[in-house]
Amino acid sequence: MATRREQFLARLIPMATGFATLILLLALWQGAAMAGYVNTFIAPAPWDIAQSFPDLFADEDVLGALAQSFAETFGAAAIAGAIGIPIGWWLHSRRLAGLAFENWVANLAAAPLVLLYPLFLVVFGRNAATIVAMAVVTALPPIVLKTKEGLDGVRRTLINVGRSLRLSHRQIFLRIMLPAAAPVIGNGLRLGLILSLISVVGIEFLIHFGGMGDLIATLGDRFEVAKMFAAICFVLLTSVAFFFIGEQVDKWLARS
Amino acid sequence: MAGTLVNRQHVRRRRLSPITAMRGAAVIVILALWQAISASGLLYNGVIPSLLAILRALVQVVFGSELYRNMAVTGFEVLGALLIGGIAGIAAGLALGASRFLSRAYEPYVHYLAPTPKIVFLPVLMAALGVGPASKLALGAISAFFPMALSIAAGVRQVDPVLLRVARSFRLSRFQIVRMIYLPALVRPISVGLRLAFGLAMVGCLLSEIALSNRGLGYLAAQDYAHFQIAHMYAVLIVVFVLAAAGNAAIVWALRRPGEA
Amino acid sequence: MSAELRDSAPTTNSQTSGSSAPLLAIDRVCKWFHTPEGVVRAVDHVSFQVHQGEFVSIIGPSGCGKSTLFNILGGLSGKSEGSVTIGGQESTGPHPEVGMVFQEESTFPWRNVIENVAFPLEAAGVPKAERLARAAELVDLVGLHGFERRHPAELSGGMRQRVCIARTLASRPKILLMDEPFGALDEQTRLLLGDKVLQIQQALQQTTLLITHSITEAVQLSDRILVMTYRPGRVKRIIEVNLPRPRSSEILASATFGQYVAEIWADLREEATRGMKDSER
């Protein structure tokens, strides 16, 4: 039986190795850049990238861009939730509809929906509404599917507890089914949030309309590569943070 | 019930399943709504063209040659992306799944980078590989790598430890264990991972083509948009969606097992 | 060899408050199902009565319709024929005086122990302070004092079933129906929980109907035992258990206990064998 210390080390050493590998790669990259092996227009030295971070804040209003991307992402996810959860509930409660349309929604989830963005562009014009609308469409399928899955998956016995206590349909739904399905529905919302972020940044990038995507594209156009890499790192870190927080929320929901 | 129908084998009448009926009704409603909005002039004229206009454009597109030239380019990009990203993903997934150490060291990076928007790498790739299909393929490969690696890693870990103990008790060789226990267990994760990878590679390649390109289906759609040939653009998008569905179905079919649909 | 069929009315009641009207009476209840293979009779003309304060067990081989009977008595599924009378009135559907404890795990994972137990009271609109107080009493009664704020995921299977029992008792049912509540637990835990059930029954004078496949459990806990035949389920025999109360699991040591067990097994073995042959076909 491993002692606590052994268990701790068993986790720490691999993590440290992974991190060390990352540092090593960065160091190699830095060395190659300084020695001239790497074209710094394509891949600037890590040190230069690090040094451009403050410029992001000073010159480029990266926080403003971040705020815009965030607002669009969360807004889209909220709207997708407001639309998607009732649809998912409808597919769950009407058995025929569920059987008929679940496949369609699953196929939509896999389809390249983002490609529809030119249409939203024509309808809404070049503004935030287009971005949000597109993100809503991409976020809907997983939310719908997970809502149906969560409600379908409530164990029959739990519902029977409600029936044996003579609770009304509404009471059973509110007091038993919703809490039981909450972890799965939350999972769907988290997926929707992630897809929303991907769509938002992608479209901002393509239509050059504010937010982190636009920032990266603009810096690229201007050939300010170090700053651009810094901005890319920023987006990556933000998305990682998003994902991580989402997982913690998931865990918290699942435990209760 | 259907008792009398069963006897009349020569009458080729099939009962319409309620599911098909419902789906058919939904399609009709959607098309009718579309046509209504189009005819009403509610939205700016060209945005929702009539069904007829779209149909005509579709015929034009399918029977023209322009589509196939560009489909070939996109197809090359996507397949290349799947090949490179897929193989890299399988290799990484196997390593991560088999070794607890490697998993703890490196999988968090894969796990947390997976949901990031890969399009942000496009400027770098274009600077490195030019504006041709290569940069699009590279973006597609990066997009395809992550779902594949994670799916395979999970698949390897999910092999029931009991099965491994049974295998060892029969003193199977390492190779036999891989062939008879791991490989069959991995068909499902490969299928799931490949479908996700395919979808993401497609999106990656097409969006990159829209961003900057002179060839490919994404480029076609972007051109149509730029020249406000909206019906034509719809036609191209329809083709794209059909291809996506077909690709998905092909993967499911190729990796199906007896007993599954 | 045809099974002995006994009609319901027992000749003696081990514990009665003096009234002779049964609390629960089921009369010639039948249940059949239509399957592709034809009509399957799960329960065939079952009749018996349960009086106030009694502990009755129903025991039978797998496939004898015990769980079907449980669902019918609890009102969760309909009957094809016959009547179920509770407190003198015919009952269809879940009855307020009947509480059900299910075989499967049924705690609400998102609520802690005390919230689980208070659930029926909360649904009925009982104010918070009162329902928490009542729930706390029941949590004590089932022996989970100190675990009020824990979540079911942190508890063992036996503890979770105790939570379910406490929750069902919260609605103060006149009749407690339990369907193999300890089926998933190991023998020793079952015996200890059996003791707990005896204590509860003693304290509350709770009328209880227990479905079980464990002979020792039935004899340990009951005043009367109904032995059912294999499908179609009928009452094969009714056995009065004249072991003294208050009881505990120590009763296992007595010779009389062994005799009851042997008697029941003699009946059950035949039915269980038929069941096994059937499933091999």
Image (cartoon, rainbow, N blue to C red):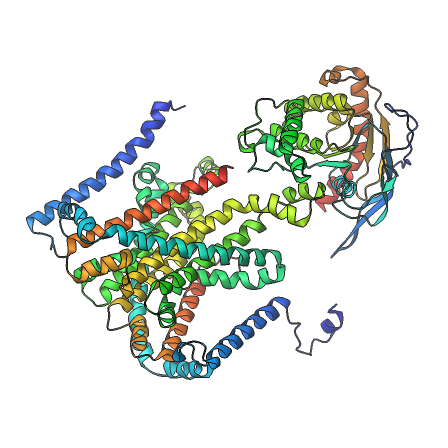
Q: Nearer the viewer, residue C54 or A248?
A: A248
The residue drawn where x is 67% and y is 29% is C166
Question: Does any portion of residue B145 appear in the rendered image?
Answer: no
Residue C192 position, x and y percent, is: 66, 21
Tell me the residue at 75%/67% (across/down): B1
- On the image, the x and y values in percent for residue C239 come to 85, 28
Residue at 46% in and 48% down: A187
Viewer-proximal residue among C21 and A31: C21
Q: Locate residue B87 relative to residue C123 in the image: left or right.
A: left
In percent of width and height, residue A154 lies at: 59, 46
Q: Is residue C9 visible?
A: yes
The correct choice, above or below, for B12 with respect to B85 in the image is below
User: Can you tell which quarter of the image residue A129 is in?
Assistant: bottom left
Front-most of A187 and C228? A187
Q: Quadrant of residue B68?
A: bottom left
Corner quadrant of residue A111: bottom left
Residue C247: give x, y in percent of width and height: 76, 17
- Outermost residue toward the left? A35
Q: Compared with residue C20, is residue B46 higher up or lower down, i.e. above or below?
A: below
Taking C223 as reference, is B120 left or right? left
